[in-house]
Amino acid sequence: MCECADVRMCEFFRLIDQKHSHIRTFAHLHICMLSLYSYHCLMNRKIIITQDGSHSIMQTCEFPEPAISKHSHIRTFAHSHISYHSIYGAIQESMHVFIDSGLKPLLHAQQEVYVFEMGFGTGLNALLTLLYAEKEKKKIYYHTVEAFPLDNYFVEEINYCTQLNRRDLQTAFEQLHNSEWSEDITISPYFNLHKANADFNYYETGKKFHLIYYDAFDPESQPGLWTLPVFKKLFMMLLPGGSLLTYCSKGAVRRIMQEAGFAVEKLPGPAHKREIIRAIK
Ligand SMILES: C[S@@+](CC[C@H](N)C(=O)[O-])C[C@H]1O[C@@H](n2cnc3c(N)ncnc32)[C@H](O)[C@@H]1O
């Protein structure tokens, strides 16, 4: 099994605990572990080219549906195709949502910024953040969590440095992916990285952040990551005055954010998207 299989196992057993505690016998656990292994094998990812020429990942999974609760967020992956970014342009979307609407105004006002990202994925947000930190010569502490890391094949193929006309950053991009989990790593004088190979639902860090990039799959695909307890947790992770950026502007999500304590504002969206959300503590 791959290095993140333990994370999937935790998630799987959490679902069993929640929904199917009656089947927690040794025999059934054995079947569950086999199912989990199948899930791992059947999850299928491929590189796609989005409209601005930058790559994204399309994920498909054909996990047999009855094995998982209908309402769990793993069901998302059942018979579905989900893309890591907007098909209208991965780079243009990340630039607009996270850098222009979140990082830029903050870095303008202060010398160092603590950023938390939910879902490291392709590393695009981290790369764009690194680029901007270098440009402004300001320090970023970048903390990110990823439950299902990409295999090396993708890291080598993904074209972000070429698309950004920064082939010189390819080594740094690969270092973002290959650096150790759970350690503070200096990628450059202006960029420190801490990656956790974990499920955000269980992840705790004592640290507080100025900025959160909330880049989970959408609420239809991953409802479990758009709930009140999740946004209460995110609220607690922010420093006073800190903000959370997300591409998702659905009314239901905005109401949950407000209930969690955020002041929510709509900002203009990237290509083919009317609005995005900045939620402020
Ligand atoms: C929409 S993609 C965005 C990825 C990344 N920000 C990028 O630009 O490539 C969502 C990411 O969240 C990860 N993910 C899904 N569920 C998770 C969970 N419960 N905890 C941590 N990461 C998760 C996925 O594997 C995927 O990499």
Image (cartoon, rainbow, N blue to C red):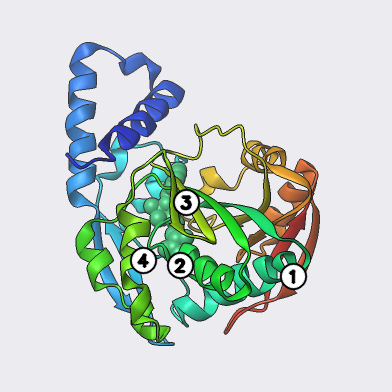
**N-terminal label among 3 and 4:** 4
Disc 3: which residue:
193
Measuring from the top left, give residue 111's x and y in whole percent.
Answer: 71, 60
- Residue 173 — which label? 4
Q: Residue at x 20, y 42 (%)?
A: 2
- Alpha carbon of mark 2 to alpha carbon of mark 3: how far? 11 Å
**N-terminal label among 1 and 4:** 1
Judge the density around disc 1: few (<14), some (14-19), many (≥20) Cα neighbours within 10 Å.
few
Q: Amino acid at mark 3?
A: Leu
Left or right relative to 25: residue 254: right
Measuring from the top left, give residue 65's x and y in whole percent.
Answer: 30, 44
Give the secondary structure at mark 1.
helix
- Alpha carbon of mark 2 to alpha carbon of mark 1: how far? 19 Å
**N-terminal label among 3 and 1:** 1
**N-terminal label among 2 and 1:** 1
Measuring from the top left, give residue 135's x and y in whole percent.
Answer: 58, 76
